[in-house]
Image: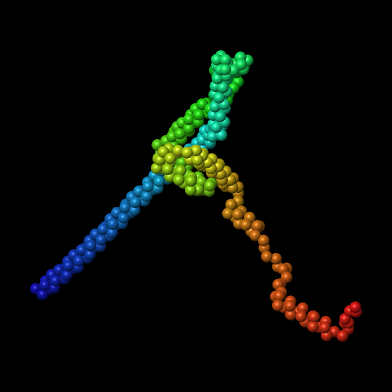
Amino acid sequence: MPDNNDEQSVSLESDTQKKISTWAAEQGSNSAKALESRVAREKERLDWEEEERQKKIQEREDAEKLRQDTERRALYAELESLDYDLLSLLDFPTDHELYTAKRARTLWFIALGSALFLFLASLLSLTSSWVGGIAGGIAFVLWLTHGAGMMSYFPSLNRYPSLVTLRKRLKRDLIEYIRNLEGRLGYMHRIYPLVQYNSRLGSRKFKRLALMSKEHTLLANLKTLQDTRAYHEFMIEALRGYQEMLQQEKEDKFVESMDFDPDLLEENAQQAITPEPSEDKPEAVEPSLIKEGDAKKHAEADNDPTLFAPKD
């Protein structure tokens, strides 16, 4: 009996140990699975957060790009409403006009002075009275032409001061107009991307002006007429580039509205332009073979007895 009890107790202990080891293994596997699931969920959460962050960044970039495109298009549209007459200084007096007006005014002063001198000389009995009378009449008429009422009939008398005043006013108006156009952010360098539609904007003088516009030193460097003329030329070329951009967009929209592939259309056009090699083209004969054949013909003609030399 004691032996049987010992055997039963040993078997119970072994069964208990097996159950404990099995339970421990199950708990270990369950904890490992739980840990793996937590790690997987955490990874999924991090991936989702990263994806959402990238989406937000992309949305902000798209919104910023759309804002920049809208702002740039608004700047491009302003090209159509610029005062190109003022930018080109269409009414700006030339040096020749100033010289002509100054010479006319000088001649008027000389004529008036000469007439007054002859009139005073006749009063002092240095010249005859009829010469003094004619000179006095001429001096009186010339003096009347300087009055405000007679200026419209003799425009050359006040032309020089009016031209000088017009020059100063046009320069002042042009600088003020460019200052308002450029503003605090600059205008030229923001419309410079139109160079991809008009290659003339890529010249060195236009690059220099755009760089000065970006550095806010443009107004300080517009000192001569050549600089203002270059500014006007830049605006003209930018307007042409803007018109070319609008034309290309219209063409692209027209092609997109069709029911065919534009790439396939271009390939067909290229194939139609490229000539196909003809199959009936005769084979080229080497010049050495032609020379050998001619030599053989000449030799056979010399050896032919039926041929006689021509008589004199």
In percent of width and height, residue 115 lies at: 57, 20
Location of residue 94 by image quarter: top right
- In the image, is residue 216 above or below residue 21? above
Q: Is 154 placed above or below 37 here?
A: above
Residue 240 image position (x, y, % from top left)? 55, 42
Residue lying farthest front?
A: 126
Give the colour scheme of this rendering.
Answer: rainbow
Position of residue 175 in the picture relative to residue 111 (left or right)? left
* Direction left: furthest residue: 2
The residue under the point 65% across, 57% down is 273
Q: Residue furthest right?
A: 311
Question: On the rendered image, what quadrant is the C terminus found in?
Answer: bottom right
The image shows residue 173 at horizontal and vertical percentages of 47, 30
| Viewer-nearest residue: 24 or 194 | 194
Task: Choose between 104 and 261: the one closer to the eye.
Answer: 104
- Regarding residue 62, the answer to whether it shows in the image is yes
- Specify whether residue 137 is in view: no
The N terminus lies in quadrant: bottom left
At x 46%, y 31%, the residue is: 172
> Which percent across, then down, holds residue 203?
50, 48
* Up/down of 279 relative to 94, above or below: below
- Tell me which residue sits at (40%, 47%) in the image: 58
Q: Is residue 56 left or right of residue 15?
A: right
Tag count: 0
Q: Nearer the viewer, residue 198 or 140?
A: 140
| Residue at image coords 57%, 26% | 107
**Residue 5 in which image quadrant:** bottom left
